[in-house]
Amino acid sequence: MHDDGRYDDPRVTGSAGDPVSRETDYPGWVAHGKPASPSPRPPDCEPVVQHDPPPTGVARPVPPELPTARSAPDGSRAGNAPAAERVAPARGNAAAPTRFEVAVPQQPAPGSVADAGRVTDTTASPAVPYEHGGDDDTYVSRETPTREEDDPPLAMEAMRAVQILNPSGEVTMPRPERTRVMCVANQKGGVGKTTTTVNLAVALALHGNRVLVVDLDPQGNASTGLNVPHHTGVPDVYDCLINSVPLEDVAQAVEGIPNLWCVPATIDLAGAEIELVSVVARESRLQRAIAGYPGHFDYIFIDCPPSLGLLTVNALVAAQEVLIPIQCEYYALEGLNQLINNINLVRQHLNPRLEVSTILLTMYDRRTRLADAVEQDVRNHFGDKVLQAVIPRNVRVSEAPSYGQSVMTYDPGSRGATSYFEAAQEIAERGVTAPVSRNA
């Protein structure tokens, strides 16, 4: 007996060299003198006969036939004949014994092995050829990336980070001919005034512009975002407004960001509005402090408090442009008319050069219809003053101040940093193509 999965029983096949399948287990069959184990196979189920393969092509296993009652030549039932007599002789050779083999899976054709690595589409049209080298050879491996997948997400994020940080300093944004003093104002709190001021200033400073940030909010959040000391006892903007201290004595250079300075705000600024009531020319105190600065800045951003008091009026008088961040919610639109009315009053009586030049949509959530409706209303009302860049809701923007950084340096590859970079670039380009009136 060989160890190839077959038994040789001359009493069944008539030859000692013909193998017999292990599956040949039916009543009356004996292997080497030992009775076969009982099988649930019906007594009249005939064994599968494996014929000689055809000359060409691939041999396929013959499925077993259903047990049927066949009549022997002498009229008796085939099921009653001995097992050795029920074996049919091979076709074309009566002397050759019949071989019983285990059915094996069908093997692929020799020509199909070469295309085993090819990914084919079973739903493709039959007219498209499946062979290599043809004119319509459109089948490629799944490993081949498409045009949209040429740059993986990490590579694209790294490219954006290098573009925003600009370590070489070669890429610069357009510089205005004269200083642009921009007041970031909105009497509603939580719309992104401080975040917008800090990130726009950092983006412009990283690309060759000299920027000064004046923190006019008693909370001092802009000073925190730029990592500038603003504790009690530090010279701040309060000294400029009340004690007429020169602005250059209180301005501090921002660490890690070249060409960026900040005038911090301390808690003392909370009482400035009350003290300014009795000061002569109280509305223009900040304007005179900025005009007396001996250096030159390309941009001066004034971060206003969420109110329409004397501090905000001082910022509106000192500025030529107003940048209004608008949160994409209904409450942000409700108080916008009051802010526009106050700006018009300041223009008529105190600063005729003041104008609303920029509207920036912040905290945009594209999953909601409300954000889209607010955007459409703002664009229909203000037209070209609304920046094309929209600031989305991004957790990196909120995390950055806790590390004393802007989102531009905290995570330059994030969506928030990219959006603020696009907004800064758009502001710089608008200032060159359509310059506004500026101080000499």
Image (cartoon, rainbow, N blue to C red):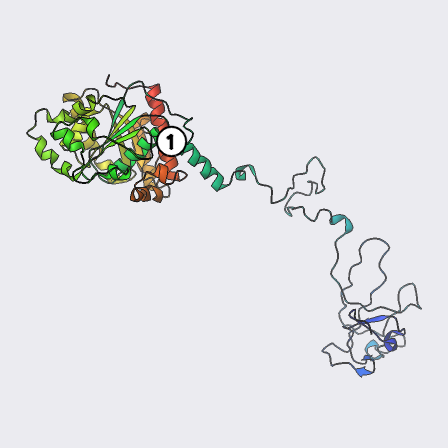
Q: Is residue 423 above or below residue 66?
A: above
Residue type, mark 1 in image: Glu
> Residue placed at 35% from the left, 43% from the top?
396
Question: Regarding mark 1 in the picture, which secondary structure is present there?
Answer: helix
Q: Nearer the viewer, residue 78 or 34?
A: 34
Location of the N terminus by quadrant is bottom right
Q: Is residue 11 above or below residue 107?
A: below
Q: Residue 148, position in %: x, y?
A: 53, 38
Q: Is residue 23 above or below residue 320?
A: below
Q: Residue 75, position in %: x, y?
A: 87, 77
Q: Is residue 398 above or below residue 186?
A: below
Please state if 61 lies on the left or on the right of 207 as rendered.
right
Q: Residue furthest left?
A: 278
Q: Nearer the viewer, residue 341 or 33?
A: 33
The residue indicated by pointer 1 is: 422
> Residue placed at 83% from the left, 76% from the top?
78
Specify the quadrant of the image occupied by residue 229. top left
> Residue placed at 19% from the left, 27% from the top?
247
Q: Nearer the viewer, residue 400 or 113?
A: 400
Location of the C terminus by quadrant is top left
Q: Is residue 182 visible?
A: yes
Q: Residue furthest top?
A: 440
Please state if 92 lies on the left or on the right of 345 as rendered.
right
Specify the quadrant of the image occupied by residue 400. top left
Crowd tier of the residue under label 1, counting other residues whose Cα lies within 10 Å: few below 14, some 14–19, many 20 or above? many
Q: Nearer the viewer, residue 105 or 389?
A: 389
